[in-house]
Image (tube, grey):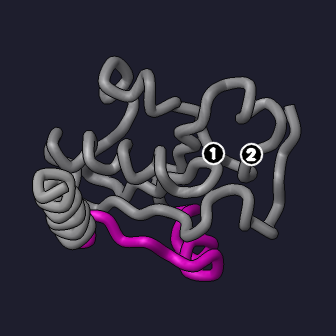
Amino acid sequence: MKYLLLALIIIIVIAVFRYFRQRTYLKTLTEDQFREGYRKAQLIDVREPQEFKNGHILGSRNIPVTQMKQRLIEIRKDKPVYLYCQSGARSARAAQLLHKKGYEHIYQLKGGFKKWTGKVKQG
């Protein structure tokens, strides 16, 4: 029982540490803030191709988080990167990878695509 409690405490500490460290390089934007800046940025949908086909934010490119390492050449370091996925978990993972590779201006959509009320393109 004592070891289980200790393991739980360690997991919580790591999660809190990661959360606060992530906030130093990833800025989460409301839909209005996101809409304000994404036209001047690289808008990237990190969901899988089938999800992208079912609907995506107008003007976005599909670079799934599972392919991001191999496709970094497609993402410029000198322009802001606006990421989104379905809910926010995958865009956070993509942001972590980009940060490790030297990208600085990284943003994600709060709540992800499922909370988006703006224009959507099907297909």
Q: Disc 1 vs disc 2: which is toward the camera?
A: 2
Please state which of residues 121 and 4 is positioned toward the viewer in this rendering: 4
Examine the image and state in which quarter residue 11 appears: bottom left
Examine the image and state in which quarter residue 9 appears: bottom left
Q: Provide the secondary structure element on which disc 2 rests.
A: strand
In the image, residue 122 above or below residue 10: above
Q: Where is residue 91 in the image (x, y as percent from the top left)?
A: 46, 49
Q: Position of residue 14 (x, y in %)?
A: 16, 59
**Residue found 63% across the figure and 75% down from its top:** 31
Q: Position of residue 96 (x, y in %)?
A: 27, 48
Q: Determine whether label 1 and label 2 are within 8 Å by CB.
A: yes
Q: Position of residue 93 (x, y in %)?
A: 36, 45
Whether residue 81 sits left or right of residue 3 in the image: it is right
**Residue found 60% across the figure and 56% down from its top:** 87
| 26 in magenta | yes
Report the magenta residues as a range.
Answer: 23-40
Query: Which mark, residue 37?
Result: none
Observer able to see residue 114: yes
Q: Name the residue under label 1.
A: 60
Q: How crowded is mark 1: few (under 14 residues within 10 Å), some or many (20 or more)?
A: many
Number of on-image labels: 2
Q: Provide the secondary structure element on which disc 1 rests.
A: loop
Query: Which mark, residue 56?
Result: 2
Quarter of the rendering occupied by the N terminus? bottom left
| 98 in magenta | no
Q: What residue type is labelled 1?
A: Ser
**Residue found 29% across the figure and 62% down from its top:** 105
Q: What residue type is labelled 2?
A: His
